[in-house]
Image (cartoon, helix red, strand yellow):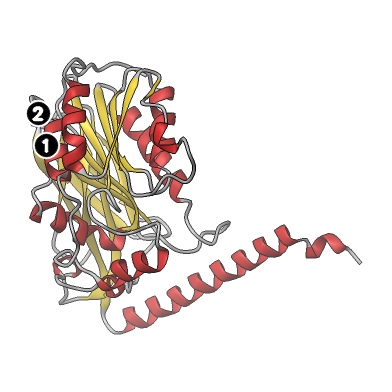
Amino acid sequence: MDLNRFAPGRFRQTAITVAHRTETGIRDRLARRAAGRGWTPAVLPYSGYASAQHARVLGRVVLAPASVDPAARRGISGWRRLLTLESPGTEVEIELGGTRTTVTSDSAGIIDARLPLDTPLEPGAGTALLHVHGREQVPATVHVMSGEPVRGVVCDIDDTVWVTGISHPARATWRTLRGSSSTRQSVPGMARLLRAALEGQDHPGVVYLSNGPWNFVGSVTRFLARHDFPAGAVLMTDWGITPDRWFRDGREHKSSSLTRLMEDLPHLTWVLVGDDGEHDPALYGDLARAHPGRVAAIALRQVRRAAKIGDEQEAGSVDGVPVLRGADGDKLLPLLRDALRNRPPAGGNS
């Protein structure tokens, strides 16, 4: 008998493979039933970003009744937003600033298109038009950043923008699944902190980065607008089983997203805003070390108590980049202004 067949690692991978195939099979059967009832592919637009040379356009294709616009749903509790039926392998036409292309949604229905621009876009809020057969065109916001060296902000969402309580999983899950954008509590002073980081910048970059599922992006966007956060692109992820993992790797999602921002926007210098509840301190520190001169400051909201003596005396800088800590945005604001006073924006290649 080959005992290796029963090794824990192999058993785990087999279980994941079976679960992934089962989930995919159920989705495909539901999709066939929905199509038989007249449901067709529809685009949920997400906010992307652009520079002078190229744009990143984001969205998702789901199945919905022909008379329903799924992007128009409002006031829905979190758990109901998870009940979507994705449409993988669907062609989507994209038009932006005279550039047209056709892309295909991935296995989770996601569209993540990088469009070279024939003509530079005007800085500010632009609009890409997304179209699937049988539906009206859907507008997707594209935040066009300055083509000149400028400072931008990358900001985490959970426990940085709004209160989630990630350090208490059961409480965090309850808030996520039961709440909506109108019931979430804003972290004091964070909107002011982000606006202060952008003072004096002409069309700066603003990106919100989260490990939350794309299903919640509408709630996040409305919350940000309601609480006067600066408008920007929102980058989230897809939950669920993958061919080789039970859950998506949140740390890898954030790390790869940060690296891509550095590559897509080489002329921007960033202020990185997050919290110390999970991976932000390590991820932001790694990014500052890997891309000298591209990070102006790291601002961390403190959400955990010191686990041991000495935690409160963590390094105040990473390779010369100031690392600021405070209980909320109001506490961080004077520290950030101080740190940025003598650090003008400086673009350049990493």
User: Badge 2 local density, few (<14 within 10 Å), some, or many (20+)?
Assistant: few
Q: Is residue 84 above or below residue 235?
A: below
The answer to whether any part of residue 98 appears in the image is no
Q: Position of residue 189 (x, y in %)?
A: 14, 45
Q: Which mark is residue 195?
A: 1
Q: Kindly indicate the quadrant of the structure image that contains residue 72.
A: bottom left
Q: Which mark is residue 102?
A: none
Which residue is nearer to you in this view: 219 or 148? 219
Which residue is nearer to you in this view: 216 or 134? 216
Name the residue located 21 percent from the left edge and 36 percent from the top edge.
332
Name the residue located 64 percent from the left edge and 68 percent from the top edge.
15
At label 2, which amino acid type do we have? Glu
Name the residue located 39 percent from the left edge and 48 percent from the top edge.
305
Quarter the C terminus occupies: top left
Q: Which residue is mark 2?
A: 199
Q: Position of residue 316 (x, y in %)?
A: 36, 26
Whole-angstrom CA distance, mark 2 to mark 1, is 6 Å
Name the secondary structure under disc 1.
helix
Q: Kindly indicate the quadrant of the structure image that contains residue 109.
A: bottom left
Q: Is 132 situated left or right of 8 in this image?
A: left
Q: Is residue 88 above or below residue 303?
A: below
Q: Kindly indicate the quadrant of the structure image that contains residue 348.
A: top left
Q: Are marks 2 and 1 in contact (CB under 8 Å)?
A: yes
Quarter the N terminus occupies: bottom right
